[in-house]
Image (tube, helix red, strand yellow):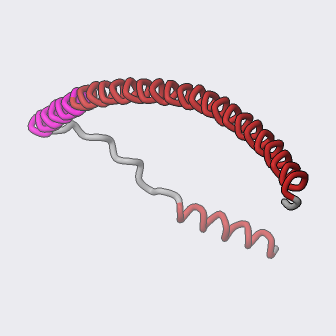
Amino acid sequence: MLRTALVLSLALALGACAADEPPAEPTAASPEAVEALEARIAELESEISDDLEAEGEDRAKLDGRLDRLAGKLERSLERLREALDGVKGGSAEAAEAAASALATARSVASDLSVLEERYNYHLRRYHGGGG
């Protein structure tokens, strides 16, 4: 019995929440409203067209600038490569010159050492002294 009362009260509550009136049918718009909407649509289409055209011009300008910058970058990189190649060649030449100078210095130091030994020998032998 309690179950039946609960089901009946639930059914009544759901029935009370249901919509009593069907949704309203759309009504025909006035001709002035239609003309105003058509004018607004044409205005928006014109604005969009102008914006797209301006964007196309901006994109073309941007593409041109990017192409010019890419060209400058390529030329700069090529000059950098050439400079690095020159530095590598120059450093190889400098290393060869330094090695040659070192070999000459060693040869001179060796000759000087031989002369110093001979000088000391002569001092000891003929003059009774020397280091």
59 to 125, vertically: above or below: above
Residue 91 picture quarter: top right
Give the vertical position of 59 relative to 118 (above or below).
above
What residue appears at the point 78 percent right and 39 percent down from the top-left corner? 111
Q: Is residue 113 left or right of residue 25?
A: right
Quarter holding the N terminus? Answer: bottom right
Residue 10 on image: x %, y %? 67, 67
User: Vertically, is 27 above or below 57?
Assistant: below
Q: Position of residue 44 (x, y in %)?
A: 20, 35
Q: Please indicate whether residue 21 sits to the left or right of residue 91 in the image.
A: left
In magenta segment, residue 46: yes
Asked if residue 11 is among those painted magenta in the image, a careful observer would answer no
Q: Is residue 106 or residue 77 the one in the foreground? A: 106
Q: Give the quadrant of the C terminus.
A: bottom right
Q: Where is residue 115, by image quadrant? A: top right
Query: Is 43 left or right of 64, judged from the image as shown?
Result: left
Magenta residues span 30-53
Position of residue 107 measured from the top left corner of the image (x, y, whole percent)? 76, 36
Tell me where residue 58 sits by quadrant: top left
Nearer to me, 30 or 116: 116
Q: Residue at x 47, y 24 (%)?
A: 78
Report the residue at 56% width, 25% height from top: 85
